Image: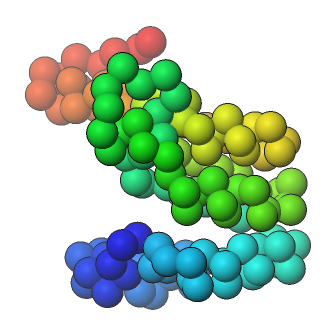
Amino acid sequence: TRNPVKTKDNYKYLSNESKFSIVKLDEEHVHNLISEVNHNADKKVLVNTLPLGLLDSPSSGSYADENSYALHFINKLNSKQSCYFDLIYENTQAIHEAKAKGLNCINGKLMLETQAKESFYLWTGIKIKN
């Protein structure tokens, strides 16, 4: 996150969760996180929430910009027990790199579809099956 203090203030329940790491996106914190993941045998899930790095983006600007933190993290990661989850609804450069390294990856399309179905149900009372 760009602001860990603000994230923890807005989501108080995360402060009591020992399974989460909320780190600032800067070189020092990313380097420390990479080191921790590479030296720990536990499975890790990296969740990227930045709207950056769309492949074949028709737009210019931030969505097409490379996500340098995610790419740096993925390139230094040596744990095959890690999973990379990018909340962007399409595949990103980071997902492409993670797949090339053999990591499990998922984009945010399933999350979007699941949220849309639940929202539709809450508004209409009608469940969408598939």
Location of residue 123 in the rendering, given as x and y in whole percent from the top left corner: 12, 28
Which residue shows up at 30% across the image and 39% down it? 61
Q: Quadrant of the C terminus?
A: top left
Vertical order, 128 against 109 (above or below): above
Which residue shows up at 30% across the image and 19% down it? 127
**Residue that extends furthest to the left in the rendered view of this protein:** 123
Out of 12 and 28, give the one closest to the viewer.
28
**Tally of numbered tags:** 0
Location of residue 55 in the rendering, given as x and y in whole percent from the top left corner: 52, 28
Vertical order, 27 against 78 (above or below): below
Location of residue 21 in the rendering, given as x and y in whole percent from the top left corner: 55, 78
Out of 48 and 55, give the one closest to the viewer.
55
Location of residue 32 in the rendering, given as x and y in whole percent from the top left corner: 67, 84
Q: Is residue 12 visible?
A: no
Left or right of residue 22, residue 59 in this image: left
Which residue shows up at 71% across the image and 56% down it? 74
